[in-house]
Image (cartoon, rainbow, N blue to C red):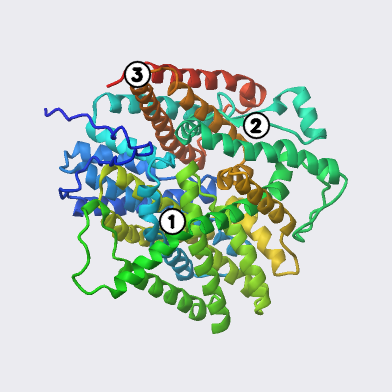
């Protein structure tokens, strides 16, 4: 049996390049590889169908939206290895890129479109498909001009945690050797660890200060609580994000949970605050810290994300100007005058991108005007402007967020889009059910555009590290979006007919319920929490003046604290193992070993999370409810510390190459 040569990413794959230094991917730019083949396209499409159906099914029924990229990468590696495919690594990138559309399109669809059913309004299948399809295509086209900036010019400056984990799966699986063994071992440990938590409840998934009597009393009276997720996947994510960004994210969380929420209780504790006209009846003091976060404080994070995004757009003006200049120059260039580029540098031609955006926008306009979305052409034009402006502006925000923390704040940006769209649509005469449908379909287009753009930058970074042809990734990504849109909307239609979204036994659909709760009062005389958005905006502006990255801080304010605290633990481990020696080569080897372990935790957790969710959906109840309630939190800290100890010990055992 032929022994495969062990593969690993070059030493400079995840650090800033020195002056004159060049990154050389695993697949040589001077060679051509069998990337797009009948096999890779067929398997990619099958993965898109399978995971779109599974993600929509589980996301709406169980309330869990999982990212499909890593499970698809694991399956792709297993299949090409079993079939002994030539150029397996090159084909697996395409399989992952096409199939990975499933998670992003599903998120774009189920965050918004089920809200139409929840509000009791009819919508047909093709309206949903077009909303997801056109939004996804727009997200791809808007992102392509920024590919070189994010994946090449910013090389080593962003951690790209999800891209790192997926790349490690693809590379280690292809090459075998010690790297593959480390990844498989860590994947087994992380997957088993998270599976035991989610399926059996042997210990609590989240540890809170309320587990102690004094902590519960402080949470009740002062609304002050700390919570930490004990999962392996989140710990691994923190390791890859690194100490710098994880600390900034955590500071955003601590500001909200230790200062803003207790301060709101102290100042307005006896008051009923109904900022959106939703009929809130509870006083602040009657709410739990979690409810105050959900109903009020989280909106500060949304305002911060939006403002940080605008600041980022202003700072990236040179990049936007460069992309626009490239488009203009390409239109002026005579046929055949284009400079030949290496295979790994070639994008879809800018002329094609520009015409693609124009056609996509015209189709969106036609969809709004003649697809039963709005009442007249003027309103369709207004809807088109909302989609075009917000999608374009926030595409870079979504990509930035994915590059930093591997988490796309698409629900927050979509919520902001819905509020802006609702205000504008009401102003141009759209009210009642017609207005709500229009706002939600517009929100669906934008949500899918941002979700797909964020996911796509991960694919392109994977391709950059490995040495794929970006032009092929960009072209075939659209096929994945189309297949995923058709699948997720069909599943949504079937689930509505089978379970419904309202009443007893209805689907959970938490994100869509939140969108419906926000949008309904907007078309019934309600308002938006502008004060909270303004506070978040002010915080982002102050941070920018203080030279503190505003977007990760704002993400910390928006993402629940239990997911942010373990990021710091993972980041601290990364710092610790990479600084213990005076030998830089040994530190780098330990860092890389830890990255493999962290990637294994993420991959194992993602894969077993799908299995656990399927068991829950099938009503296979193995959860130790009484044990978990009585001892879960007290026990949880022990296995979590054991996981931390394993990561440190295994990383420190590494020797330099």
Q: Quadrant of residue 181?
A: top left
- Going from N to C along the chain, the mark reached first, 2 or 3, is 2
* Separation of residues labelled 2 and 1 (CA atoms): 31 Å
Q: Is residue 49 visible?
A: no
Would residue 271 appear left or right of 382 to someone viewing this image?
Answer: right
- Rendered view: 652 above or below 77: above
C-alpha span from label 3 to label 1: 37 Å
Q: Nearer the viewer, mark 2 or mark 3?
A: 3
From the image, state whether disc 3 or disc 1 is nearer to you. 3
Mark number for residue 73? none
Q: Nearer the viewer, residue 586 or 293?
A: 586
Q: Residue at x 59, y 32 (%)?
A: 565
Residue closer to the observer: 533 or 429: 533
Please, is residue 640 above or below residue 78 in the view?
above
Question: Pointer 3 and pointer 1: residues touching (CB < 8 Å)?
Answer: no
How packed is label 1: few (under 14 Cα within 10 Å), some, or many (20 or more)? many
Q: Which residue is mark 1?
A: 453
Residue 227 numbered mark, or none: 2
Give the x, y percent position of residue 354: 36, 70
Calculate the distance from the C-alpha at mark 2 to the C-alpha at mark 3: 33 Å
Quadrant location, the C terminus: top left
Which of the two labelled residues, at mark 2 and mark 1, occupies the earlier sequence position?
2
The reply to whether discs 2 and 1 touch (Cβ–Cβ < 8 Å) is: no
Q: Quadrant of residue 167?
A: top left
Query: Mark 3 sits on what residue?
Result: 654
Residue 87, image x and y in percent? Answer: 18, 43
Q: Is residue 394 left or right of residue 303?
A: left
Residue projecting furthest to the left: 1
């Amino acid at each position: 049996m032929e022994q495969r040569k062990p593969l690993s990413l070059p030493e400079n794959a995840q650090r800033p390049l020195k002056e004159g230094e060049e990154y050389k991917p695993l697949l040589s730019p001077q060679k051509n590889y069998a990337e797009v083949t009948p096999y890779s396209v067929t398997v990619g499409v099958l993965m898109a169908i399978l995971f779109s159906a599974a993600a929509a099914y589980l996301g709406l029924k169980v309330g869990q939206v999982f990212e499909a990229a890593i499970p698809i990468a694991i399956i792709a590696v297993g299949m090409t290895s079993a079939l002994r495919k030539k150029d397996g690594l090159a084909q697996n990138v395409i399989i992952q890129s096409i199939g990975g559309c499933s998670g992003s399109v599903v998120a774009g669809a189920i965050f918004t479109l089920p809200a139409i059913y929840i509000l009791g309004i009819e919508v047909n299948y093709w309206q949903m498909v077009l909303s997801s399809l056109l939004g996804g295509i727009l997200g791809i086209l808007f992102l392509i001009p920024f590919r070189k900036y994010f994946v090449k010019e910013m090389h080593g400056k962003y951690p790209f945690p999800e891209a790192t984990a997926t790349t490690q799966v693809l590379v280690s699986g292809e090459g075998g050797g010690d790297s593959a063994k480390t990844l498989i071992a860590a994947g087994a440990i992380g997957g088993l660890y998270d599976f035991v938590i989610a399926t059996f409840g042997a210990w609590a998934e989240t540890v809170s200060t309320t587990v102690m009597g004094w902590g519960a009393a402080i949470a009740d009276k002062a609304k002050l609580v700390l919570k930490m997720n004990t999962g392996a996947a989140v710990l691994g994510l923190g390791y890859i994000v690194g100490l710098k960004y994880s600390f900034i994210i955590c500071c955003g969380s601590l500001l909200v949970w230790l200062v803003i929420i207790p301060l709101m209780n102290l100042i307005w504790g006896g008051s009923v605050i109904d900022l959106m006209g939703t009929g809130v009846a509870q006083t602040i003091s009657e709410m739990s810290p979690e409810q105050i976060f959900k109903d009020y404080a989280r909106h500060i994070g949304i305002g911060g994300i939006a403002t940080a995004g605008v600041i980022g757009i202003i700072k990236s003006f040179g990049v936007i100007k460069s992309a626009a200049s490239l488009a203009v120059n390409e239109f002026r260039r005579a046929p055949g005058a284009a400079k030949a580029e290496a295979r790994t540098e070639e994008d879809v031609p800018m002329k094609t991108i520009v015409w693609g955006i124009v056609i996509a926008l015209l189709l969106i306009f036609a969809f709004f005007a003649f697809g039963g979305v709005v009442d007249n052409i003027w309103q369709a034009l207004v809807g088109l402007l909302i989609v075009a402006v917000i999608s374009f502006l926030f595409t870079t925000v979504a990509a930035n967020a994915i590059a930093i923390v591997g988490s796309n704040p698409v629900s927050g940006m979509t919520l902001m889009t819905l509020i802006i769209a609702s205000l504008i649509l009401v102003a141009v005469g759209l009210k009642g059910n017609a207005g709500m449908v229009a706002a939600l379909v517009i929100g669906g287009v934008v949500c899918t555009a941002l979700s797909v753009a964020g996911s796509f930058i991960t694919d392109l970074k994977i391709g950059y590290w490995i040495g794929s042809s970006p032009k092929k990734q960009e072209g075939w990504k659209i096929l994945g979006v189309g297949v995923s849109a058709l699948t997720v909307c069909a599943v949504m239609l079937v689930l509505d007919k089978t379970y419904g979204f309202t009443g007893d036994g209805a689907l959970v659909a938490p994100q869509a319920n939140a969108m419906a709760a926000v949008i309904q009062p907007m078309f019934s005389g309600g308002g938006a929490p502008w004060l909270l958005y303004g506070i978040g905006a002010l915080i982002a502006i102050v941070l920018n003046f203080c030279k503190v990255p505003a977007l990760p801080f704002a993400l910390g304010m928006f993402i629940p604290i239990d997911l942010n605290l373990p990021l710091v633990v993972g980041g601290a481990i990364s710092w610790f193992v990479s600084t213990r020696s005076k030998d830089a080569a040994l530190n780098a080897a330990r860092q890389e070993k830890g990255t493999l372990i962290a990637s294994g935790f993420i991959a194992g957790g993602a894969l077993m999370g799908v299995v656990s969710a399927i068991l829950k959906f099938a009503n296979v109840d193995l959860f130790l409810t009484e044990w978990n309630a009585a001892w879960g939190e007290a026990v949880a800290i022990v296995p979590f510390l054991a996981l931390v100890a394993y990561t440190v010990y295994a990383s420190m055992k590494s020797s330099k190459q």
